[in-house]
Amino acid sequence: MNMTLETIQQLVKTVRHLADTYPDFHYLPTTQTNNESRCAYNTGGCDKYPGLSGCIIGQAVRKLNVDIPANMNLVGVQPILLLLPGVTATELKSEANVVKIEKWLQSVQLYQDSGKSWSRAVERADRRAGQGCE
């Protein structure tokens, strides 16, 4: 198994663990861009869980002991994956399993950003991107 796949699978496990631990977490963005609320990896949270900040992907990345620089707070999932140790751009684009998992992570992010709870975001991503992202 290559390092990129192994590392991203660990991120998926962490995302799933967060969704299981905080199933009713509804992310509330706090970052403002052009007078519009934006979801961000390091900011925003949930009134019910005041000690947690950032979206599900941001929290999962930080649980893997990787800091997300402030200037990357609003980028897509792929640049965030490249912050993970051992993850390479070549494998992100060419490895079929990695591409599938990246799509799953993007789906989780999309559903969370649209107001779904973390558990629903993961369920919907499973249906949209397919099972097998373990």
Image (cartoon, helix red, strand yellow):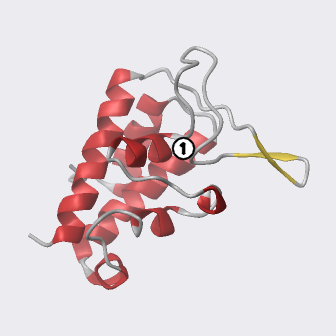
Q: Report x, y in % for residue 14.
A: 30, 41
Q: Report x, y in % for residue 106.
A: 47, 57
Which residue is found at the position 67% from the left and 31% from the top? 28
Q: Residues within 10 Å of mark 1 (few under 14, many from 20)?
A: some
Residue occupying the far left of the picture:
1
Relative vertical location of residue 93 with respect to residue 78 in this rendering, above or below: below
Relative vertical location of residue 103 with respect to residue 66 in this rendering, above or below: below
The reply, left or right, for residue 120 in relation to residue 53 is left
Residue occupying the far right of the picture:
35
The reply, left or right, for residue 11 in relation to residue 3 is right
Q: Could you say which quadrant of the image residue 63 lies in?
A: top left
Element on which disc 1 rests: helix
The reply, left or right, for residue 122 in relation to residue 30 is left
Q: Report x, y in % for residue 41.
A: 57, 48
Q: Quadrant of the N terminus?
A: bottom left
How many numbered tags mark residues here? Answer: 1
The reply, left or right, for residue 53 in relation to residue 104 is right
In the picture of the structure, the residue carrying the numbered disc 1 is: 111
Residue occupying the far top of the picture:
48
Q: Amino acid at mark 1?
A: Tyr
Which residue is found at the position 29% from the left and 65% from the top? 85
